[in-house]
Image (spheres, grey):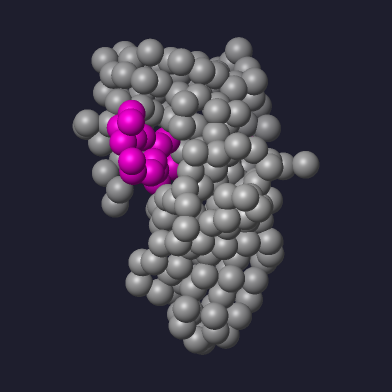
């Protein structure tokens, strides 16, 4: 069983829909990261959080430390949001101080 | 552009050849990580440096892999006697030790071993 599990693996939605991607983890963490990866490979950090909730534009990330669960929400989704969204955690089992352990990613497609 | 650069962006090689990748971090970032990502999977940790010291290596890093960061700035990852299973995206990420910020990723080097 992976230490970081994401769901769903694939998600196709219509433009304007509210999107939720879930992440569960099984290890002790100091932080959880949401990352975005576009075709071509480049990874961009969206959020780093250790408690509560963060918002940036149409993106919202929440974390529940007790339940070891995080969600990434996208409001008013747009085709340019189409990408792979990756959940990662910072734990000492991830290799090196602050090394990341990654989920497999959620492939999101927003259709016009 | 995150400020982290990697070269080359793409590399095609024949099985058995040696390849070397380079990562140039953001200048004030003293921690540098190498990750490998195969198709359809999330990245996996390979190794990391704090300044010029290589502090940890994953068991994924066989003896054919070697990484250096000679002056605590850029880093190289070399794969000797490449195998088809080495085909993957190799990602570099950097950040400041103790910083409250996340890691900054380079664009990656996509390796194809024929």
- Indicate whether A74 appears above or below B24: below
Which residue is more in the foreground, B38 or B25?
A: B25
Percent coordinates x, y for residue A103 in the rendering? 62, 48
**Quadrant including the C terminus of chain B:** top right
* Residue located farthest toward the front when viewing the structure as drawn: A66
Chain part drawn in magenta: B92-114
- Looking at the image, which residue is at 26% across and 15% down? B71
Using the rendered image of the protein, determine whether residue B47 is visible from the camera's viewpoint: yes
Q: Please indicate whether residue B111 sits to the left or right of residue A53 in the image.
A: right
- Looking at the image, which residue is at 22% across and 32% down? B27
Which residue is more in the foreground, B80 or A90?
A: A90
Percent coordinates x, y for residue A39 in the rendering? 49, 59
* Residue located farthest toward the right when viewing the structure as drawn: A1
- Indicate whether B37 appears above or below A79: above
Percent coordinates x, y for residue A79 in the rendering? 47, 78
- Looking at the image, which residue is at 39% across and 66% down? A55
- Indicate whether B12 appears above or below A20: above
Which residue is more in the foreground, B2 or A74?
A: A74
How many numbered tags mark residues here? 0
Which residue is more in the foreground, B98 or A87?
A: B98
- Looking at the image, which residue is at 64% across and 71% down? A11
Is B110 in the magenta? Answer: yes
Using the rendered image of the protein, determine whether residue A84 is visible from the camera's viewpoint: no
Is A68 in the magenta? Answer: no
């Amino acid at each position: 069983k992976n230490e970081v599990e994401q769901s769903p693996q694939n998600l196709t939605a219509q433009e304007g829909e509210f999107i939720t991607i879930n992440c569960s983890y099984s290890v002790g963490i100091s932080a959880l990261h949401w990352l975005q990866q576009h075709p071509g490979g480049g990874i961009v950090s969206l959020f780093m959080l250790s408690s509560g909730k963060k918002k940036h534009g149409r993106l919202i990330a929440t974390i529940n430390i007790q339940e070891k669960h995080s969600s990434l929400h996208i409001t008013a989704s747009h085709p340019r949001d189409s990408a792979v969204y990756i959940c990662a955690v910072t734990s000492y089992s991830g290799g090196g101080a602050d090394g990341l352990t990654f989920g497999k990613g959620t492939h999101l497609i927003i259709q016009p | 552009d995150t400020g982290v650069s990697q070269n080359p962006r793409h590399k095609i090689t024949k099985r058995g050849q040696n390849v070397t990748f380079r990562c140039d971090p953001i200048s004030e970032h003293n921690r540098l990580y190498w990750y490998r990502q195969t198709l359809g999977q999330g990245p996996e940790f390979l190794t990391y440096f704090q300044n010029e010291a290589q502090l940890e290596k994953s068991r994924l890093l066989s003896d054919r892999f070697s990484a250096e960061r000679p002056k605590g700035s850029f880093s190289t990852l070399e794969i000797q006697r490449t195998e088809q299973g080495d085909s993957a995206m190799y990602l570099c990420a950097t950040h400041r030790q103790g910083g409250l910020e996340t890691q900054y990723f380079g664009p990656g080097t996509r390796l194809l071993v024929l």
